[in-house]
Image: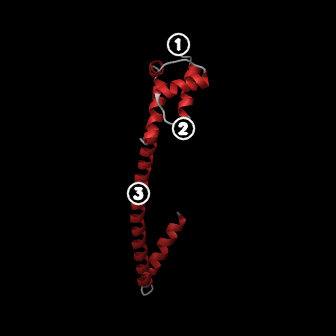
Amino acid sequence: MAAPSLSTQQIRKIETLIQVWQSKLTWHHLVDRIEIELNIKTTRQTLNTYNSIKRAYDIKKQEFRGKPTPEFIKFTKSDLEAYRRIINLEAENKILQQQVSRQLDFIRQIAIQSSNNPLLTQLLNKVKQDLEKK
């Protein structure tokens, strides 16, 4: 008969064993390997009562099935949020570049017009000096 409880250290060793598991994972295989490698006699029912062991087992099974783990889903959601933020910032950047381009065209047109108008040239120079003082 298996021991009714496991120590915290034994639980951690079993979780580690599950995390590094590389072949087909079943409760039967796990119980056998725990007995061989860790020298712990236990049963599937006993292992299943420990939430951390059950969770590690379920996560490893999901990995083998190709289903994403909760950690992967969380990581993917944060990546998706970052991607959306990047897309929004790129769109905003494009709009701002267009505005800057239009403003530069406006300034160029003013410069062209001021070459024929001394009062406009004088006004632009005054504005430039005021801005340089700031």
Measured as percent of width and height from the top left, residue 131 is found at 50, 67
- What's the image's color scheme? secondary structure
Instruction: Return the disc, 3 or 1, that comes first in the chain's sequence.
Output: 1
The Cα atoms of the two marked residues, 3 and 1, are separated by 56 Å
Instruction: Return the disc, 2 or 3, that comes first in the chain's sequence.
Output: 2
Q: Are marks 2 and 3 in contact (CB under 8 Å)?
A: no
Q: Residues within 10 Å of mark 3 (few under 14, many from 20)?
A: few
The Cα atoms of the two marked residues, 2 and 3, are separated by 39 Å
The residue shown at (54%, 16%) is: 6
Foreground tag (3 vs 1): 1
Residue type, numbered disc 2: Gln
Which numbered dot is residue 3? 1
The residue shown at (55%, 17%) is: 41
Residue 64 against residue 1 in the figure, above or below: below
Q: Residues within 10 Å of mark 1 (few under 14, many from 20)?
A: few
Q: Residues within 10 Å of mark 2 (few under 14, many from 20)?
A: few
Q: Secondary structure at mark 1?
A: loop
Q: Are marks 1 and 2 in contact (CB under 8 Å)?
A: no
Measured as percent of width and height from the top left, residue 73 is found at 42, 41
Foreground tag (2 vs 3): 2
Which numbered dot is residue 87? 3
Residue 66 or residue 68, whichever sits in front? 66
The Cα atoms of the two marked residues, 1 and 2, are separated by 27 Å
Residue type, numbered disc 1: Ala
